[in-house]
Image: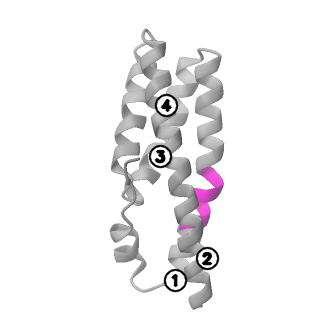
Amino acid sequence: MTQDLDLTFLYEIADGSNEFVIESIDMLLQQAPEMLDSIGAAINTSDWPAAAASAHKLKPSMGFFGMLISQELLQEIETLCKAGGNDPAAIAGKFAQANEIIRTNIGELTRVKAEKEAEL
């Protein structure tokens, strides 16, 4: 599986603040699974506008955590859905890929968060 997580940017803007890193990770841990679930549900019911909107909402967080592959996949999902969902198989495939990568990263971020909390 592709590693798609680079916390360089997060650490740069955190400027040494573990609290900031923890809060940022916490926010993603709360939002990402919900967003992924709503994209998945929207794709399953062919609700392309809703899938596009959720993908769009989740996309900026990916850049923040250096998850550029996931960000690109979400962009492609958003674009395909906005085009009317003419290729549901492609959308489902890209979503399956993004979902797997992001959920794997959620596990890694949970570990990083625990590490940072231990340093406080």
Tell me which amino acid carries mark 3: Ile
Compared with residue 47, is residue 30 higher up or lower down, i.e. above or below?
below
Q: In whole angstroms, how far apart are the C-alphas of marks 4 and 3?
A: 10 Å
Compared with residue 23, is residue 62 higher up or lower down, i.e. above or below?
above
**Could you tell me if residue 74 is visible in this image?**
yes
On the image, numbered disc 1 is attached to which residue? 18
Q: Position of residue 29 (x, y in %)?
A: 61, 58
On the image, numbered disc 4 is attached to which residue? 95
Query: Mark 4 or 3 closer to N-term?
Result: 4
Rendered image: mark on residue 114: 2
- Label 3 near label 4: C-beta < 8 Å? no
Q: Secondary structure at mark 3?
A: helix
Residue mark closest to the camera, 1 vs 2? 2
Query: Which residue is depicted at the point 35% across and 45% down?
Result: 69
Magenta region: 25-31
Q: In whole angstroms, how far apart are the C-alphas of marks 4 and 2?
A: 28 Å
Q: Position of residue 55 (x, y in %)?
A: 49, 35
Query: Which residue is depicted at the point 43% across and 29% down?
Result: 94
Tell me which amino acid carries mark 1: Asn
Main secondary structure of the magenta stretch: helix
Q: Secondary structure at mark 2?
A: helix
Tell me which amino acid carries mark 4: Phe
Give the camera-side residue of 89 and 53.
Answer: 89
Q: In whole angstroms, how far apart are the C-alphas of marks 1 and 3?
A: 25 Å
Compared with residue 17, is residue 35 higher up or lower down, i.e. above or below?
above
Q: Position of residue 14 (x, y in %)?
A: 42, 78
Q: In whole angstroms, how far apart are the C-alphas of marks 2 and 3?
A: 20 Å
Query: Mark 2 or 3 closer to N-term?
Result: 3
On the image, numbered disc 3 is attached to which residue? 101
- Label 1 near label 4: C-beta < 8 Å? no
